[in-house]
Structures are given as C-alpha cells and as structure tokens.
Image (tube, grey):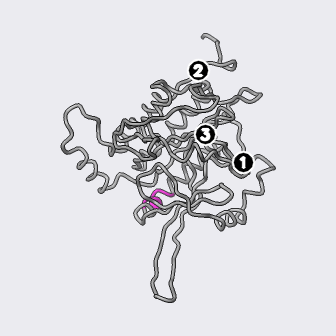
Amino acid sequence: KAAQQRGPDNDEEYRHLDDDASYVKSLATSFSWAANGGKSGASFAKTADGRFVVKCISRTELQMFLDCAPAYFEYLSKAFFHNLPTVLCKIVGVYQIGYHNRVTGKRSMEQVAVMQDIFYGRKIGRIFDLKGSSRGRYVNVNKGEDGEGSSAGGVTPSGDNAGNSFFSKEDGEGKPSTTSDDDKTGPASDVRRSETDTVLLDENFLEFTSGRPLPLTDRAKAIFHMSILNDTLFLSIINIIDYSILVGIDEDKHELVVGIIDYMRQYDIIKQMERVGKSVGMIAGAQQPTIIQPSLYKNRFQNAMERYFTSVPNKWTSTDID
C-alpha cells in the first residue's frame, strides 16, 4: 500500500469500534461544539469520544447530497477496493431528526450530517482551512476575529518547532505513515485546544510559512498530489464547489493530518447569482470572486496546493537516472 493504514479494518486494538453499537453509543454522547473558522453559521456537535463531528445542514444541502450519493459511494468504493489515494473527510451518515412538543403541538425537523473527525487521536498544534483563495482569507488571531482582508495581527509559530519544516515521518519500510485522513484513527483525542481554538486560513498559512511552500517527503507529496487530483476531479464532475482542505500540524510526530471538507454544496442557481453579485463593481486587475464555476474552482484549488506544499528528498528518494 502507498501508506500505512491504521483503523478498525487492520488494527486489532480498534476493531471493536467498527460496529453499529459503537457508532450509536458515540452519537448518544455528543455535545454542542463551537467549531471555529467557518462563515456558514451552521451548528455543530461532537461525540464525547472525539470520533465524529455532527453538522446541522439545510434541506438544500441534504437534497444535494442525496442526489450525489450514488456517485459519492461509488467513488469511495473504488478508492477503497483499488487503493486510490483520497483525502475526502468521510461522511458516515446523513439523517433527518423530527421533534414534537406535546405541550405546544409544534413539530420541527432538522437535518444533520455525521462526519469523521480527522484529528481523532492526534495532538494538533495548529489548524488551517485552505481554499486556494486569498480574498477574505485571513484571521486576526490577536483579536480572535476573521478579517475580510484584515492585515493586522499575525501568527507567530510557537514551541520547539517554531519556524521549522514539517515532514511526514517514515516508518521502517520507507512508507509515509500519514498523508490522508484514512490513517487518523486512535484512542480518545488529546488535542491542544489552547492553540487550535482559532482555525487559520490561506493568508495565515502563507504568513506561517513565510510565503514558502511547506516541505513534505517526496513519497508523501506524491500521495497528497494524487489525492488532490482524484478528489477535485470527482467533485468537479458532480458540480461541487466551496470545499476546502483542513490541514492540522501534529507537532509531536511532525506529520500533517489533512482532509477535504464542506463538499455538500453544488454550483446551483443561487451560487451563480452570488458569483454575479460579487463580480459587479470589481475593478480591472482585482482578484477573481470567491464563487467560481466547478472546473475553475478545481483548477484554482489544485494550483494552490502545488504552491502551498513541495517535496524534498530523503533517504528513500530514488537517485536512479534512466
């Protein structure tokens, strides 16, 4: 395999987690969670064991996911059975929950999506939410607020790894131990919340790396690159935009934990109108609007990942010359 896998399917220690009873038990212990970094205003919950994140979604998002579900499960099936690299954050369940207040007689319905928590079992020191755009993609960490083009404040690397390059660690066989979110299963999460309270954005990432790409081992970069190509092509085919990639830095293991999230919105008529509205009044030479067509969004996202990450040689790098 391209990367060492950990999880219920191949580790006896975690095999007990891969059953319906364990899944229901996890959901039964969920609590309200104030997730930072997004602008959608959606409500979130997190299971007490840290395995899953529950997100409230709109009826439109639910219907869009149901429309795309056959293609989505076919894609994941091919990735699983043919070992195709992917970094999609897995959606493990979508539900409608009905409420009936017997006193008032009022009925209500909510829709939720249950997703894996890619940082489960990790000690994450810093989190970035990357879209490949710089327009309104900066968080003022000094004031704890996101700025639409704000230039005040900044991110200062802290700890022993401040300013250092982060590489994917290698195991004894020369295989990267992480690049995709499939590898991130472990015991109850012990996350450094003091550092991860604020989810940082693209401009913060460039500030953190001083404008240089973050180095990965050449094997890890190759798997990451193929994952991005596979996933963004699939999302473009089913007309999805506005997704981003969550990047967590495990500073203890010097590993990146990544997963593509927020891929439940298609490029519908509302998004088309929003794009037109954001384009009106833009001066010549200004940055393109954040809402763009799926194929263009895919290209921008792929190009950004190439700028944000690069490969460096290590002892496993081949020096053969044809």
| Residue that sits furthest to the right in the current view | 12
- Taking the spot 58% from the left edge, 51% from the top edge, the residue there is 90
Q: Earlier in the sequence, mark 1 or mark 3?
A: 3
Judge whether 152 appears above or below 23 on screen.
above
Is residue 293 shown in magenta?
A: no
Q: Which residues are magenta?
A: 64-69
Residue identified by numbered label 1 = 186
Task: Classify 309 as above or below 70.
Answer: above
Task: Name the amino acid, label 3.
Answer: Gly
Q: CA distance from mark 3 to mark 2?
A: 23 Å
Q: Which residue is mark 3?
A: 125
Q: Are marks 1 and 3 in contact (CB under 8 Å)?
A: no
Indicate the position of residue 230 as horizontal and vertical percent values. Answer: 51, 39
- If the image is split into quadrants, where does the C terminus sit? top right
Seen from the viewer's position, the closer of residues 206 and 111 is 206
Between the C-alphas of marks 1 and 3, the distance is 17 Å
Q: Quadrant of residue 40?
A: bottom left
Compared across the picture, whether 224 is left or right of 187 comes to left
Question: For numbered disc 1, what is the local secondary structure?
Answer: loop
Report, in whole angstroms, how far the alpha carbon at label 1 lies from the one at label 2. Answer: 28 Å
Helix, strand or loop under label 3: strand
Q: Quadrant of residue 255?
A: top right
Residue 231 point in image, percent of width and height: 50, 42
Q: Which residue is mark 2?
A: 312
The tally of labels here is: 3
The residue drawn where x is 58% and y is 57% is: 53
> Please, what is the dominant secondary structure of the magenta stretch?
helix
